[in-house]
Amino acid sequence: MSSSLPLAIIQFETPPEAVIDRVGEQQHWFIAALGLQPGDFIVVRPDLGEALPEPSSVAAAVLSGSWAMVTDHAEWSERSAAWVRSAVEQQLPLLGVCFGHQLMAYALGGWVDDNPRGWERGLKQLEMNECSAGDPLLSQLPTHFSAWLSHRQSVLQPPPGAQVLASSAQDDCQIIRYTPQALSVQFHPEFTGGIMTACLQNGQSSASLMEHQQEPASPLHLLQAFWRQHRQASRLA
């Protein structure tokens, strides 16, 4: 039995300084949510010109959220989209989150743009559809669950052949399954209430969105199950 390969945390840019000062940046949120230790992960910053990992060198990859927009078509974003296509072809397990969700959908042929229903922010209710019952990562989750969200753009049309597994009142594509190895979610399974509050930065508006909100368990369970499944698979390889 070989030692396990690391998880690649693909971090796209950094939050505003005010957010970093309070709660750190994207890599820290995933490390905390997954209880990762040194050696369990690598962090890659395409926006700094860093090379994306060879799919054979990592057990899986998580694609982070970002304050950037997929429709900006930044060089690092387009390079990351090309890497997503290659990683999917090589069957690397992928989990896209928020910007990472939109980037995966765009890379694989979907349509991403401003959501005509407006910003979706705070703790929102999601509903899984009948197709989710057979999904290995989702079958143990409740049909309805809440999740932290903060996004202006959305996947308005999924890629050909992709399967939408969950929706919310403002977004029809909350979870998309592309292949047995590749999944993406619009919500933030790595968020806590503290991270959400720091990201909102809207004074009284932020306070009203966060009042009496409890930490949702199901999104975190999904994230942890993704890594547990693929970490174990890499150990057995």
Image (cartoon, rainbow, N blue to C red):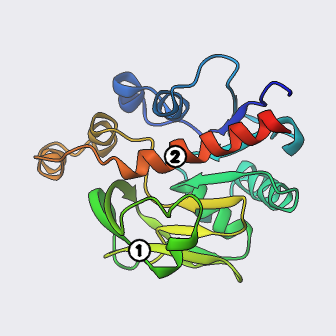
**Image quarter of the N terminus:** top right
Query: What residue is rendered at 30% in x and 48% in y?
Result: 216
Amino acid under label 1?
Answer: Ser
Q: Position of residue 62 (x, y in %)?
A: 63, 45
Quadrant assignment for the C terminus: top right
Q: Which mark is residue 167?
A: 1
Percent of width and height locating residue 78 = 75, 57
Q: Which residue is mark 2?
A: 223
C-alpha gap between disc 1 and disc 2 = 18 Å
Question: Left or right: 85 with respect to 175?
Answer: right
Which mark sits nearer the N-terminus, 1 or 2?
Answer: 1
Could you tell me which residue is drawn at 70 percent across and 38 percent down?
A: 232
Q: Position of residue 167 (x, y in %)?
A: 41, 74
Q: Which mark is residue 61?
A: none
Q: Is residue 142 left or right of residue 160?
A: left
Q: Amino acid at mark 2?
A: Leu
Residue 12 visible to the viewer? no
Instruction: Count the numbered circles shown.
Output: 2
As rendered, which of 154 and 48 lies closer to the eye?
154
Q: Secondary structure at mark 2?
A: helix
Q: Is residue 194 placed above or below 142 in the rendered structure?
A: above
Which image quadrant for residue 110?
A: bottom right
In front: 189, or 102? 189
